[in-house]
Amino acid sequence: MSYHDDRTGASRPLPPRLDPRAGRPSRPDAAGDTAGSGRRRLAAGARVVAGLLSLVLLGTSGWGWYLGRVADASVNRTNAIPTSGNEQTVDTGEAMNLLLVGNDSRAGATEEELALLNTEANPGLNTDTMILAHVPADGSAASFVSFPRDSYVEIPGYGWDKLNAAYAYGGMEAPDGASDAAVQAAGAQLLIQTISSLTGLRIDHYAEVDLLGFFKLSTVVGGVEVNLCEPAKDSFSGVDLPAGVQTISGEQALAFVRQRHGLPRGDFDRIVRQQTFIGGMIRKMLSDNVLLDLGKQRELVQAAADALTVDQNLDLLRLAQQMQSVTPGSIDFQTVPYVGTDRDEQDRSIIRLEDEETLQAFFAQLSAEPAPAEEAAETEAPAVVSAADVDVEVYNGSGISGLAGDAGEELTASGFQVTGTANADSMDYEVTEIRHAAGDEALAAALAAQVPGAITKVVDDATSGTVQLVLGSDFNGVGQAVTAAPPAPVTEGADARTAADTDCIN
């Protein structure tokens, strides 16, 4: 069996069928997925964030320069950033976007470690949850957006599929006999192209971590505090924890972020688990017992550097310096906006995300940089002018016959110079608008004072010195506030929380 590659025009062998339970392809030479190994799929997103933050947050300590240099010298590098298909359509200014990914590789784990982790050897290069981290230019905050592995997306060159298929498809593009590093790089590049197309963001950097690294990190840090609303016990993941506040590490930390069976919302609750663990890791790393323990810092940085693979140009020391003012309360977590679960043409369970316009609006909002306070202070208020100085053209867009004439008469009675009335280009305006040319802000402000609540905007086709009043169905007359429309919905991701949150979770 083969398929047509849209990018190269060549016929390529079909990838192995996705496991309907695990939802991921493997490379042709990977070990077959048994029912047992399918139940032991890992929530890798928490691992990679924990590893990266180990390097970044500890780099803010007194000897961070040394730690940063150790990390940069020790961390593995990969050619992850593609030269095409990673274009930015959503403006993020000087902010940094990092794609954080986890894989299921257990290479290097001993038999004892594998037994302790309730898993087995696996050379696969599969991905679970992917997380996009957005760091503003001043490093004062960070936003982490989780992408469920079953998100149904368009993968460049392969059509629609689950998001976690992108990495495996990319790895299959590597030439036969290619090294694991080359396969890893090819997988990362296609995953980045997929995320970039979906979000409208340019992905600047990439970081990936494996299972064993996460286990060692959570152990070295001395455990992470979590708060469970109910006891958690699950034979698939191996989790066995009581309800309430507790500190977890090692195999129970791994089981905690892996559990999916038995949770009310399945993968969605598992994402909350990941976010909660990351938040706890951040709080622990910023606590005195870590920041003041130089030996523990050295162990953490070395463990993180061993576990992580990052792109060729990520400067860990610079990132640490950029984020030195970060606090748990300024680090937030969300899940990419989604519609809900569904079935695809192969009758697999998938997650339908919001449409492209909604998603890109969400990421634009997430990435918006506030205007510097000093600039706002320097902005001068427009000069005050009288009604007699304002020429107004009135356009009826409300669908109410004769409204422009009535409004014109009221404006004239109020002292404005009405130079004409007419119908607007449409009768479907719901909101009244005041339009003006650039530089006529004072004239528009004088008219806006008589139509409270109207939207004021600069337009190219307005005549300088003349203000246009376009009446919508909310217009109530000159001197009266327009009928307030219900607030526009704000697109937010699901399960929003910060690293400072300690409320109980499923």
Image (cartoon, grey):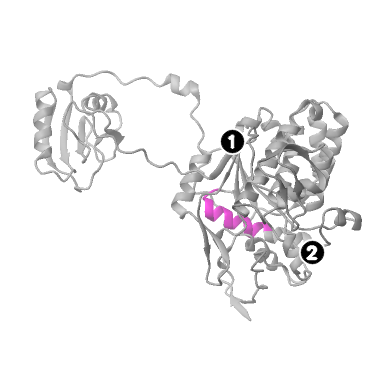
Q: How far from the left and from the top, in percent, is residue 414?
A: 12, 23
Badge 1 vs badge 2, beta-carbon distance below 8 Å: no
Q: Where residue 450 sits: x, y (%)? A: 20, 25
Residue 145 in which image quadrant? top right
Q: Residue at x 75, y 37 (%)?
A: 246
To which residue does mark 1 refer? 136
Q: Nearer the viewer, residue 188 or 35?
A: 35
Q: Position of residue 151 (x, y in %)?
A: 57, 58
| In this view, 110 is above or below 284 | below
Corner quadrant of residue 83 = bottom right
Q: Residue furthest bottom?
A: 1
Q: Quadrant of residue 440?
A: top left
In this picture, residue 74 sits left or right of residue 319: right
Residue type indicated by callout 2:
Ser
Q: Earlier in the sequence, mark 1 or mark 2?
A: 1
The quadrant in which the C terminus is found is top right
Name the residue that disc number 2 marks: 179
Label 1 crowd bin: few (<14), some (14–19), many (20+), radius 10 Å: many
What label sits on residue 371 in the rendered view?
none
- The magenta region covers 188-201
Asked whether residue 312 is in view, the answer is no
Residue visible at 86% across and 35% down in the picture = 298
Horizontally, is 300 left or right of 401 in the view? right
Q: Secondary structure at mark 2?
A: loop
Q: Main secondary structure of the magenta part?
A: helix
